[in-house]
Amino acid sequence: MFILNVNKDNFDSIKTSEKPVLLDFYADWCAPCRMVSPIIDEIAEENPQYLVGKINVDKEPELAQAFDVLSIPTLAVMKNGKVIRQSAGAKLKPQILSMLEG
């Protein structure tokens, strides 16, 4: 399983990924984030065709602001450096996969 810990220093390499990117904006203190985290881990393990990254909003407020993250967890899907889908709130695995596949 490979989940990238995304920060402002490595974000440019994520933007240029040829794979679709799933970004999970979270905080350690957020209970819904802790519910979604194992699902994100499963998706990363089972779907090597996606690049999966997690962004701690407390440590990376600039990235959270750049994505207009107002509540967490927020999931964003990027293709070719652009956000194509974004959704706030806890999601089930099929909902997250449909964001990636949709």
Image (cartoon, rainbow, N blue to C red):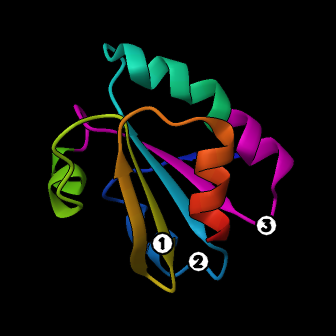
Q: Amino acid at mark 2?
A: Ser
Residue 58 counted in the magenta span: yes
Q: Is residue 3 visible?
A: no
84 vs 31: above or below: below
Q: Amino acid at mark 1?
A: Met
Q: Mark 3 falls on what kind of element?
A: loop
Do the residues bearing badges 1 and 3 touch, measured as CB atoms within 8 Å?
no
Q: Give the mark nearer the N terminus: 2 vs 1.
A: 2
Q: Give the mark nearer the N terminus: 3 vs 2.
A: 2
Q: CA distance from mark 3 to mark 2?
A: 11 Å
Do the residues bearing badges 2 and 1 touch, measured as CB atoms within 8 Å?
yes
Q: Residues within 10 Å of mark 2 (few under 14, many from 20)?
A: some
Q: Which residue is mark 1?
A: 78
Do the residues bearing badges 3 and 2 touch, measured as CB atoms within 8 Å?
no
Horizontal relation, residue 60 to residue 83: left or right: left
Q: Mark 2 falls on what kind of element?
A: loop
When asked about the image quadrant of residue 59, the answer is: top left
